[in-house]
Amino acid sequence: MNIKIAFHGAVGRTTGSAHILTINDKRILLDCGMIQGIPHHYNRNFSFDPRDIDVVVLSHAHIDHSGRIPLLFDQGFDGTVYCTPATKALAKILLLDAVKISKEEAAKEQRKSKGRYIEPLYDEEDVYNALKRFETIPYHREEFLEKQVSLKFLDAGHILGSAQPILDIDGTVVAFTGDLGQNDQPLIKNPEPIEKAHYLITESTYGDRIHPPMEHATKTLGDFAKFVTREGGKLVIPSFALGRTQTLIYFLNELFEKDIIQKTPVYIDSPMAIDATEIYLKHPECFDKETVELLRSGDNPLRFQELHYSKTHRESRAILTGWETCIVFAGSGMCNGGRILDHLLNDLPNRKSIVLFVGFQAKGTLGREIVDGAKEVEIYNKKIPVRAKIKMVRGFSAHADKLELKNHIVRIKQKPRKIFVVHGEAQQSLTFAANIRNTLKIWTHVPQYKQEYPLKPMN
Ligand SMILES: [Zn+2]
C-alpha cells in the first residue's frame, strides 16, 4: 500500500481547505474550499488536475471548505462527494449564496480591470448539478470507498453537520479534524474524541489563543441589551446567517426566560438565516442533550415570541424606520455587503445604539475599520459619523482554542505517529505545532503548500 498526503490549501491561512490523500492510484480530496483574500476569479485555477480526483470527502458546509466543488465538477471531476446529511442541506443554501457573491465579486473585479470581462465562478445550475453527486453518510456509519478503504464521520461540534472524517486504509488510520468546535456551544454536540489515528491533520485557527468562557460572553450580551433598552437605542449585530446567529439567538432566549433582561423584539434581518434555521430544526440528530430536552418539553430555543424573521425588503425597511428598541442581526458578518449596511447607516450615528461584533473581522473590511476605531466611515458613498458604542465579544467562537485543540490530541488513545497542522494563519499554526512537539513529543509539522508527504502503512 502506497499512501501519501499533499496540502493544496489552508496552509498558512484559514481558507481554501483542500488536501489530497493518495492511496496507490486513487486520490481522495479532503474538502474543496474557496480561497478568500485573493482576487476572486483566481479560485478557478486549481493547483492539481480535477480529473485526477476520484472522491471528495467534505468535512462541513462552510464555503471555505465547500465553495469550489461546483468548479471541480466543471473542470472534469466525475466522482461522488461524501458528507453528512445536515452538511448537504446547508451546502445547498451556502453554495447558492456563493453564486450571488461570485456575481458581485466578478462585477467588482471587472470594473477594476477596465472592462475586461470577468465571469462569475459558477451559476445556480452548476450548484444543482454538483448537489446531485452528493452522497450522505450519517455520523458513525462506516462506508467503504474501496475494498480496503473505509470512511467514517465523527461529530466535529463546529456547526450543524460538521464532521471529522476518519479514513481507515487497511489498518492505517488517517484522521482529519475539519474545523473543530469549541466545547459547550449551545444546540450542537461537543466535538467527539478520536479513538485512533496514526496520522492526524488538525486545524489551528486559534492555535495560539485561549477563549474567554461563554458565560462571560453571554453576560456581556445581556449587559448590552440592558443598555439599549434603557437608552432607547438598538443593538445591531453583524452576523453571518449560519452558526453564530443561532448561537446568539439561543443565549438571548435564555436571558429572556431567566428574566435577566427585559423582553425586547429580536429581528433576524436575513432571508438566508430563515432557511438555515429551518435546516437546524430538521436535523435533531445533531443536537446536544439540553436542546433535545428543551424541544421535547415544547420549548423551541430557535423560535420564541420576541423573535421575528424578516425575509422581504419591506420587512427590513420596517425595522429600519421603526423607533422601538430592538436587537437586530443582519449580514454580512464583516459588513462588506448585505442588509447590515442599511442598519449601520441608520444606527452608527446614534449614541444610544450599540454595534456588537461577535466574529473575526478581516483586514480590508468595513467591520475591521469600525472595530479599529474609525470616527467616520463611508457607506453607499456617504460619510457616516460613528457615534454608537462599538463593542466586540470573542467568547462565541465556533472554533476550539489552543487548550481544546491540544486536549483533542491528548485524548487519542494511541499517540499519533505524525501530525500535520493546517487551517491557521502562519503564526497560529507554527506556535501550535511547536507546543505539541515540545510537550507531547510527537512529530508535528506545518506542511508546505503543494508538498507531498509519504505516510508509512501501519500493518
Ligand atoms: Zn468552518
Image (tube, rainbow, N blue to C red):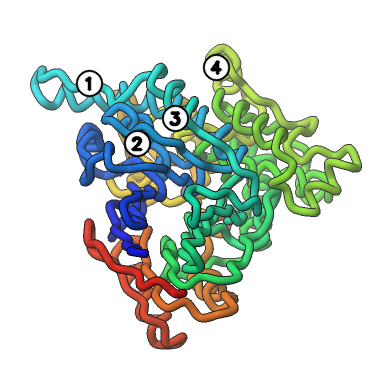
Disc 4 residue type? Answer: Arg
Task: Tell me whether circle 4 and circle 1 mark residues in contact (CB < 8 Å).
Answer: no
Please tell me which residue lies in front, 128 or 371: 128
Q: Residue at x 34, y 36 (%)?
A: 68
For marks 3 and 4, the one nearer the N-term is: 3
Q: How crowded is mark 4: few (under 14 residues within 10 Å), some or many (20 or more)?
A: some
Q: Nearer the viewer, residue 337 or 163?
A: 163
Under tag 1, what secondary structure?
Answer: loop
Q: Which badge, 4 or 1, comes first in the chain's sequence? A: 1
Residue 257, compared with residue 102, is above or below; it is below
Q: In this view, does 74 lie above or below 8?
A: above
Describe the element under mark 2 as helix, strand or loop: loop
Q: How far apart are marks 3 and 2 (CA)?
A: 9 Å
Q: Residue 304 placed where, x, y %? A: 78, 33
Say the numbered circle drawn on residue 119.
1
| Residue 209 location, quadrant | bottom left
Find the residue positioned furthest to the front. 147
Real-space Cα distance between discs 3 and 4? 27 Å
Q: Mark 3 points at which residue?
A: 95
Residue at position x 47%, y 60% in the image:
176
Disc on the earlier residue, 3 or 1: 3
Query: Residue tagged by mark 4?
Result: 317
Q: Does any portion of residue 77 appear in the rendered image?
A: yes
Residue 202 placement (x, y as % from top left): 44, 64
User: What amino acid is at disc 2?
Assistant: Arg
Quadrant location, the N terminus = bottom left
**Residue that mark 2 sits on:** 68
> Which label sits in the foreground, 4 or 2?
2
